[in-house]
Structures are given as C-alpha cells and as structure tokens.
Image (tube, coloured by chain):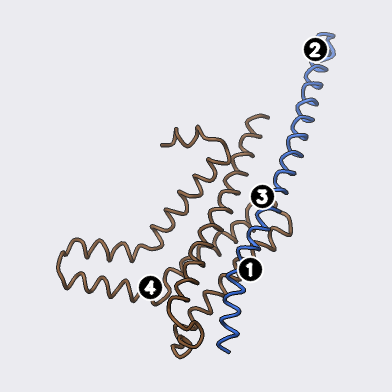
Chain colours: A brown, B blue
C-alpha cells in the first residue's frame, strides 16, 4: 500500500493522503453511529434493531453529522492558518469566509430544528433541510480534502527541495 | 423572518462553493508562482555552491589553505 502511494506523482499522492486523512477522521468522528450499528448487528433481535434505528434517528436529528463537519472544517482552517506554508491574504480570506459561511448555515439549520415552529415555515418540508445537509457534508469534505492535499503537497515539495540541496 | 432565513441559507449554499472555487484557483496559482521562485533560488544556490567548491579546490591546490 505504502509502496503504491509513494510511486504516484506528488499531487496525486497528496490527494490520496488527504482522502485517507478524511476517511480516518470520518470513522473516528462518527464512531457513535458505528458502535450502534455494530451492537445492533451483534444483538440480532427486533428490540435491538428498533433501539439502534431510534438512536441513529436521534443522533441525526441532533445534527451530530453537521457539527462534526463544522468541527472538521474549523480544524483544517486553523491548521492552514498556523502551518508554515504561506498562502496569500486572499487565500486566507477565502478559507475563513467559506468555513464561517458553512458554520452559519449549520447554525441556521440547528436553530430551525430546536425551534420547531420554524420547521414548516422556513424550509417548508424536511426535504429542503436534507438538501442543505447534503450540501454541508459534501462541501466540508471537499474543503477539508482540498486544504489537506495542499498542505501535504507543500510538505512533499519542501522535503524534495531539502533532499536536492 | 422565514423567507429571510431561507434566502440566507440558499445564498450561503451557493456562495460558499463559489468562494471556495475562487480561493482554490488563487491559491494554486500563488503556490505555483512560489514554487518557480523556489526553483530559481535553488538553482542560484547550487551555482554559488559549485563556484565556491571550485574556488576551494583551486586555493587548496595553490596551498592557500
């Protein structure tokens, strides 16, 4: 596996590393879902199935996935700001704007869920909310993979420069 | 209130990917520029090192050092 990764061109290798990073983060961050699914599959009873389905619904309704996505975006944004790679000021502005916008969207969706009376008024049906949720999940994954790939790429390039000297 | 929130949500959903795409283009262009500058700097350093090595060899043969 490692030999396969190190045989790739630098940009593809960085992308691959970023995807592995994101996958591992998703596995670790969404561990409650995995535990529930695992326990339900071990129990093999009707009650266990019902309980797990209820718990998964409960976690989804509490916006666990959305808050996980915002946490991952915030972490990547801070890493981009604090790392040794110097981006231009417009890049920093773009990173922070897009991540704050998504956090605002998560805030709106969460407030809509908490204050249920807005539920019908604002989004009309739950499908609209699902669209927003899908947008947030997809966007945060793309955002995190992009920035992490950039950081891995820069790290690789710097290593190559050091080796050349 | 409700229409305002929906509008804000829609604007954010459209604007965030657009901003990210623009940022990606700017960042990639910027990093490519930086890399070409780094490569030039490395070439210059390599030339300087070769020159100093040559001088060192020359002076060692002449018995300066």
Chain letter for mark 1, please.
Answer: B
Secondary element under disc 4, as helix, strand or loop, is helix
What x and y, as percent, mark residue B63? 83, 10
What x and y, as percent, mark residue A159? 61, 37
- Same chain? Circles 1 and 4: no
Between circles 1 and 3, the one closer to the viewer is 1
Secondary element under disc 2, as helix, strand or loop, is helix
Chain letter for mark 2, please.
Answer: B
Question: Which residue position holds label 2?
Answer: B60
Q: Identify the residue at horizontal 47%, vertical 84% (top origin).
A: A124
Question: Which residue position holds label 3?
Answer: A85
Question: Which residue position holds label 1?
Answer: B15
Q: Compare residues B64 and A65 and report the one nearer the observer.
A: A65
CB-based contact (under 8 Å), mark 1 and mark 4: no
Specify few, some or many for label 3: CA neighbours under 10 Å numbering under 14, 14-19, or 20 or more: some
- Same chain? Circles 1 and 2: yes
Between circles 1 and 4, the one closer to the viewer is 1
Q: Identify the residue at horizontal 33%, vertical 74% (top origin).
A: A57
Secondary element under disc 3, as helix, strand or loop, is loop
- Left/right of residue B30 with respect to residue A121 in the rendered view: right
């Amino acid at each position: 596996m490692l030999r396969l990764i190190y045989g790739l061109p630098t940009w593809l290798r960085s992308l691959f590393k970023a995807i592995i990073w994101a996958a591992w983060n998703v596995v670790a961050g969404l561990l409650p879902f995995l535990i529930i699914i695992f326990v339900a599959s071990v129990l093999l009873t009707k009650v266990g199935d019902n309980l797990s389905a209820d718990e998964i619904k409960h976690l989804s309704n509490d916006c666990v996935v959305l808050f996980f996505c915002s946490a991952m975006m915030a972490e990547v944004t801070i890493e981009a700001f604090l790392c040794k790679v110097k981006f231009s000021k417009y890049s920093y502005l773009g990173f922070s704007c897009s991540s704050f916008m998504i956090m605002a969207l998560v805030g709106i969706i969460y407030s809509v869920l908490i204050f249920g009376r807005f539920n019908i008024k604002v989004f009309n049906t739950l499908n609209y909310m699902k669209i927003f949720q899908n947008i947030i999940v997809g966007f945060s994954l793309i955002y995190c993979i992009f920035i992490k790939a950039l950081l891995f790429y820069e790290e690789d390039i710097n290593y190559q420069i050091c080796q050349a000297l | 209130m409700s229409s305002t929130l929906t509008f804000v949500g829609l604007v954010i959903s459209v604007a965030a990917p657009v901003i990210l795409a623009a940022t990606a283009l700017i960042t990639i262009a910027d990093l490519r520029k930086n890399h070409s500058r780094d490569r030039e700097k490395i070439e210059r350093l390599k030339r300087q090192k070769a020159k100093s090595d040559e001088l060192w060899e020359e002076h060692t043969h002449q018995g300066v050092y």
